[in-house]
Image (spheres, rainbow, N blue to C red):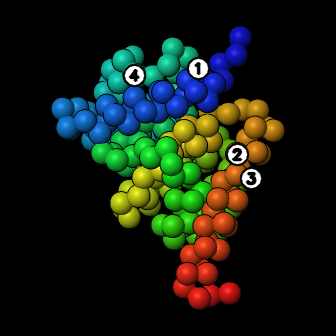
Amino acid sequence: MNLQPEPQSLMSVVVKISSVLGNESFAAGDRAALRRMQPGHPPPLAFYRFAMRYLPEYWETKLDDWVAVTAGMALMSPQAHDPTRGMGKVLAEAGYSEARLERLLASEGEVRRLLLLRAARFLAAKGFSMNWVDGAVFLLTDDGNKREALHRRIAKEFYDTQYQIERRQGVS
């Protein structure tokens, strides 16, 4: 049984999560509880209520990853998800350091979730949104080849964007 989400299915889940978290009718207390979630800690009841309504059926098999995705999107709400702005591009535009990107891409398990949440906080503080399908796939993919392909794409977006910024600023 394949518990890995298909990209199209994952995209619809991410769009739904973003829409719900960004809606002003979503309870502010629940949004705050979701923002405070940390990898390795038990999630609050607000997460379970949210998960039962909006996450895919298999969410429990990847609980820690879905906690991190939900927390990251809550941190960046109300405008968390922008399907046109890949993770690498946004990180470069926001001034994320190359050293941080290297640690993020090399990380595994709980450290990976924690570093993705730190990146989400960094982007939120600067008012950026990103394609959260990238963030979800970043955590939910176990397949080594798919994960490495994602890493290459994120790095390519990052360096392409950095190069464009440097060219505009006249740096060679």
Whole-angstrom CA distance, mark 3 to mark 1, is 27 Å
Residue at image point 54% right, 85% down: 169
Q: Quadrant of residue 137?
A: top right
136 or 117, which is in the foreground? 136
Q: Identify residue type, mark 3.
A: Arg
Q: Which residue is mark 1?
A: 61
Residue 134, image x and y in percent?
58, 43
Callout 1: helix, strand or loop? helix
Residue at image point 36% right, 42% down: 74
| 3 and 1 marks in contact (CB < 8 Å) | no
Q: Which label was assigned to residue 152?
A: 3
Q: Which residue is mark 4?
A: 54
In the image, farthest residue toward the top: 1
Q: Is residue 112 left or right of residue 36?
A: right
Q: Is residue 46 left or right of residue 87?
A: left
96 or 19, which is in the foreground? 19
> Residue 117: in sight, yes or no?
no
Residue 162, image x and y in percent?
61, 71
